[in-house]
Image (spheres, rainbow, N blue to C red):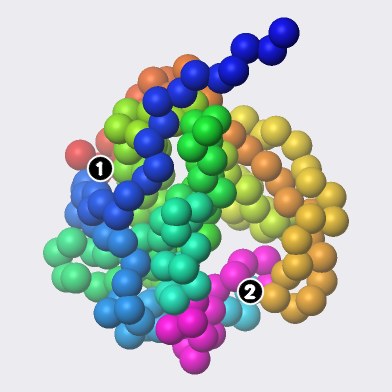
Amino acid sequence: MNTPLSTTFDTPLPVTLELHGVRLEPLAAHHADGLRAAASDGQLWNLRVTSVPEPHEVDAYIFKAIEQRPTRLAFAVIDSASGALIGTTSYHDIVPAIGRTEIGYTWYATRWQRTHVNTTCKLLLMTHAFETLGAALVGLRTDNFNHASQAAIERLGARKDGVLRHHALRRDGTVRDTVMYSIAAGEWPEIKAHLRDKLARHGVR
């Protein structure tokens, strides 16, 4: 006889998180201009392996993200010092009954890529998920041709679970395979230490 899973996972509610000069606050309509500017830095909507909105799509993008609560909680990523909007990231595919959430819908303005921002965001979101919400597992996913994203996820220390073939539509109408990764609660202390060390080695304390 199967024993029901016992979990104390709490559904993520809107919250503001901040660390190392990066602030995550719930994505809202007033972030639209900043999000347009971030997407325009590098014209990120032209990347076929991401889902960055074009400038005229930003308002609908924000509305949809808010509408998807409680299975998705989207954040604006903000530079604390200047108030400039860097990009966005989300908890998504939230399943409280099994203590699972994923982190995704993540993109940053070109000038903030390959900085401490992504590591800081992941540290903030995973710390909140595991230590405040009580998550059993945090998943991450990416396009099979988004090799930069796969490398970034692997640098976090996440384990590759496998590939879902013919899984989702890209913006250009082609169908992608999705590469799935995860970090379990028992792995979190070591991953957390790794992320902190990674930031310290880049002079972020």
Q: Is residue 163 above or below residue 52?
A: above
How far from the left and from the top, in percent, is residue 199? 32, 39
Residue matched to label 2: 47
Kind of residue at disc 2? Leu
Task: State the mark number for residue 203.
Answer: 1
Magenta stretch encompasses residue 52: yes
Work out whether residue 198 or residue 130 is closer to the camera in this orientation and state it: 130
Of tags 1 and 2, the one toward the viewer is 2
Give the number of marks.
Answer: 2
Q: Residue at x 46, y 23 (%)?
A: 7
Q: Earlier in the sequence, mark 1 or mark 2?
A: 2
Q: CA distance from mark 1 to mark 2?
A: 31 Å
Kind of residue at badge 1: Gly
Within 10 Å of disc 2 (Cα), the crowding (few <14, some 14-19, many 20+) is few
Position of 173 relative to 18 (above/below): below
View extreme (bottom): residue: 56
Q: Is residue 41 left or right of residue 181?
A: left
Q: Nearer the viewer, residue 189 or 4?
A: 4
| Residue 44 at least partly seen | no
Give the residue furthest to the top: 1
Residue at 30 percent of width and 32 percent of height = 132
